[in-house]
Amino acid sequence: MQDFVNSLNAIIWSNWLIMLALGAGLFFSVLTRFVQVRLFKEMLHLLFSSKASDKGISSFQALAVSLSGRVGIGNIAGVAAAIGFGGPGAVFWMWVVAFLGASTAYVESALGQIYKEEDEGEYRGGPAFYIEKAMGQRWYAWIFAVVTIIATGLLLPGVQANGITSAAEVALGTGTIVATPFGDLGMTKLVTAIAVVMALGFIIFGGVKRIANVTQVIVPFMGLAYILAGLVGIVMNIGELPRVIGLIMNDAFTPMAGVGAAIGWGVKRGVYSNEAGQGTGPHAAAAAEVQHPAQQGLVQAFSVYVDTLFVCSATAFIILITGAYNVHGETGFLIQNLPAMTEANSPAFTQFAVESVMPGVGKPFVAVALFFFAFTTLLAYYYIAETNVAYLRRFFRFPGEMLFLKILMMASVFYGAVKTANLAWGLGDIGVGLMAWLNIIAILILFFMGKPALKALQDYEKQRKSGVTKYTFDPQALGIENADFWESKLK
C-alpha cells in the first residue's frame, strides 16, 4: 500500500504541479499588481467589518473556518517534513509559495463569493459552483466535487488524526499495548483516537454555525499561543537567529538535499499548509456575509500570511535554532541530530525542539497545540466535504447522504489515527495534489474566459477610492454572467 501511494504521489506531485502552483501565484500577483502587498492594510480592516446573518457567517468567522483548514498538522509536522526531506532551504520555498499564493487565494475566494448560492438557509459556494457557472462545464464541476469529497472526507482527515495521536504518544508515552482489529495499539493512541472521533461527531452534527463558533474561539487563541511559544524559543537563542536565516537562504539554492528536493518539498508542504490554489478556501469564503465579493477574497489572502509566514515560520525557526532535526538523503542521513527512528512526517521534530527550550513543558504543549490545530482542520474538512455533497445533491439525491458523510469521515479519522504517519501523509498528499491540479487549471481558464475575480477587485478599488460607505456589486454591469445570488440581491 505504501509503495502504491508513493508511486501515485510521484506522478501527481511531479515538477509540473510545482511549476503550476508557483507559476499561477506569480501570474495572479502580476495581474492584480501584487494585491497581497498593496491592500494589506485593507485586509486587516476587513477582518472585523462584516457581521453574521441568519444565512451567512461573518468575515472573521469565515477567516477562522478557513484558517482552521490552513493551520493544522502542516504547520507543525508538515514543516518538519519539509526540513527533513528537503533540507533547511525548503523553508524559503514555503515562504515563496505563501507570498505568491496569497494572490491565488484572493482569486479563488473572490470567485467563491461571486458564484455562491443559498442552500437550505445557508450560503454555499466553492470551485464546483464557479466551474459550472462561469466555465459552463458541469462534468468538470462534478469531477472536482467528487474528488474533494474523497479528499476532505476520506484521505486528508487521517493526516490530522494521525498527528494528534502521534503527538500524544510522544508527550505521554505509548501506554499498555492492546490487541485490536487494526493491530496492536498503545492505549494512549487508542484512547486519543476514540476521544477525537467523539468530539468531532458532536460538533459536525451541529452544522456550519457550530463549526464557525468553535473555530473562531480556538484558532486565534491557539495560533497566538503557538506563535508566542516560538518567539520565546527564538529570544532564548537569539544569537543563533542570523546563522539560521543564513542557513535557510543559502540552502534554498544550493541545498544539502538537492535543489529539486528543497523546492519540491517546500512547495508541496507549502501548498498543503496554506492551501492557496487547492480550492479549500473558497468554500468558507462563500459562506461569509459581505457587501462585495472582493472583500472576502482579500480576507482569505491575509489568511495565507497568518498560516505560513507566522505559524509555519515559528515552527521552522524553533526546529533549526535548536538543531532538533534530521535531513534524509537518497542513501542515508545528510544530517542526523535525532535518533534514526524519529519520523520526519510527524510532530516529533517540533516537540523535541520546544522541549529543549521549555523542559518538561515543550512536548505536552506541542501535543495540545497540535490537537487544537488538527481538530479544527477536521471541522473545516467536514464543512468542505458537506458543501460538495450539497452541490451534487442538486442533481441526484439518496436518503441520508449527509449522515453517511458524517459516519464516513468519523471512520476515516479513526483509521488514520491508528495507522502509520507515512501512509497517512501519502494519502493526504494524493488528495491535496488532485484538488490543486483541478482548481488551479480552472481558475486560470476562468481568468482567460472573463477575468471575473479581477473585475471584482477593480470594481471594489474604484468604489473604495470614491469613498463610498456601503459597497454594492452589480455583476451584469461588469460583464459577469450567472452570478445569480448577487443579481437577486441587487434587485
Image (tube, rainbow, N blue to C red):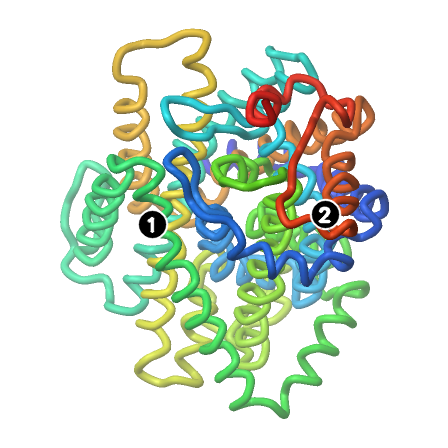
> In the displayed structure, does residue 155 sit left or right of residue 490?
left
- The residue to which callout 1 is attached is 213
- The residue to which callout 2 is attached is 103
Residue 413: image location, x then y, percent: 31, 40
The circle drawn on residue 376 is none
Residue 249: image location, x then y, percent: 76, 71
Counting labels gives 2
The residue located at (60%, 11%) in the rendering is 139
Camera-nearest residue between 218 and 83: 218
Res. 43 in view: yes
Quarter holding the N terminus?
top left
Camera-nearest residue between 158 and 21: 21
The residue located at (34%, 44%) in the rendering is 211
Circle 2 Cα neighbour tier, 10 Å, few/some/many (<14 / 14–19 / ≥20): many
Residue 445 occupies which quadrant of the picture? top right
- Mark 2: amino acid: Ser
Going from the N terminus, do you reach mark 1 or mark 2 first? 2
Q: Give the secondary structure at mark 1.
A: helix
Q: Give the secondary structure at mark 2.
A: helix
Residue 435 occupies which quadrant of the picture? top right
Residue 379 occupies which quadrant of the picture? top left
Camera-nearest residue between 329 and 471: 471
Quarter holding the C terminus?
top right
**C-alpha distance separating marks 1 and 2:** 27 Å
> In the displayed structure, does residue 430 sit left or right of residue 293?
left
- Mark 1: amino acid: Asn
